[in-house]
Amino acid sequence: MPEGPSILLLKNQLQPFVGKTVKQAGGYGPMPTDWINGRKLKEIQTHGKHLYFIFTNGVVQLHLGLFGEVLINERKKVNRKFFLEFAKGEINGYVVTVKKIETVGELFDPRTDILSTGFDVAYVKSLISRKPEKDIAGLLMDQQIFSGAGNKIRVEALYRAGVHPLSKAGKIPPKVLTKLIAAVRNYAKIFYKNLEKTGTNKDFKAYQQEHDPQGNEITMKYLSKEKRKVYFSERKQKLYT
């Protein structure tokens, strides 16, 4: 599943369409698209793993899910789930989920978006404090707390902060929790810069690794509840219980 850095990069790549008028909108998805035809694309925003196309008469919320893809001025041979065609160029979505909302005004909170300048560490810590019995691995994937964080960011942030993924949130010392939150933000920025520079991110010290850069063995554990794998170093990451 695409994580916050991938969505932010996509937003920036789509900027040439801002201010342009939609000639034809469509797709086989259930959302009606007639209301978009002839409308100017005012703005594109992101929040976590969601992309928002903002028009004067409504907003399209787009989510890529596990297998979604958005292509710019390029088409696949399969039908498009959602598309926007302009006088010059087009945006084509495949296996995406879209819905119309009236406004983004109160739709999301920038205080939880890991790549937002409005991210608020104190607020995020307060949200975590409400679930002290939860494993920190699960909370790092909670989009109401860490909007935009996915498994890669989770694994790398935990490793870099030295925190075991099965640590109980309420047992992690405040200074360590602050370090972990900073690691989430810092790695998300590294992730984005790598994508921007090379189109991919391979800067992994723990994710899908057998050993870390110091030669320590990396353990893989399958989290059955969320059906995801986490990778960690038993030696480098402390378990707080």
Image (spheres, grey):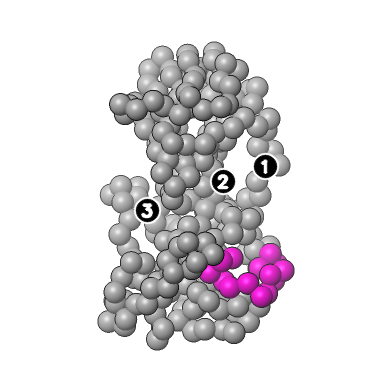
Quadrant location, the C terminus: bottom right
Residue 43 at x, y percent in the picture: 55, 31
Residue 221 covered by magenta stretch:
no
- In the picture shown, does residue 158 fall above or below 79? below
Which mark is drawn over residue 214? none
**First along the sequence among labels 1 and 2:** 2
**First along the sequence among labels 3 and 2:** 2
> Residue 181: in sight, yes or no?
no
Residue denoted by label 1: 107
Is 103 on the left or on the right of 93, as rendered? right
**First along the sequence among labels 3 and 1:** 1
What residue appears at the point 48 percent right and 57 percent down from the top-left corner?
Answer: 150
Tell me if mark 1 has few (under 14), some (14-19) or many (20+) residues whose alpha carbon lies within 10 angstroms of its own: few
Tell me if mark 3 has few (under 14), some (14-19) or many (20+) residues whose alpha carbon lies within 10 angstroms of its own: some
Query: Could you tell me how far apart the alpha carbons at marks 3 and 2 are, in whole angstroms?
Result: 18 Å
Residue 137 covered by magenta stretch:
yes
Residue 219 at x, y percent in the picture: 37, 77
Residue 232 at x, y percent in the picture: 41, 75
What residue appears at the point 49 percent right and 19 percent down from the top-left corner?
Answer: 25
Displayed quadrant of residue 138: bottom right
**Mark 3 or mark 2, which is nearer to you?**
2
Q: Amino acid at mark 2?
A: His
Magenta residues span 125-139
Q: Tag 3, which secondary structure?
A: helix
Q: Amino acid at mark 1?
A: Leu
What residue appears at the point 66 percent right and 49 percent down from the top-left corner?
Answer: 109
Query: Could you tell me how far apart the alpha carbons at marks 1 and 2 are, in whole angstroms?
Result: 9 Å
Residue denoted by label 2: 47
Label pair 1/2, CB-CB below 8 angstroms: yes
Q: Tag 2, which secondary structure?
A: strand
Is 208 on the left or on the right of 133, as rendered? left
Residue denoted by label 3: 193
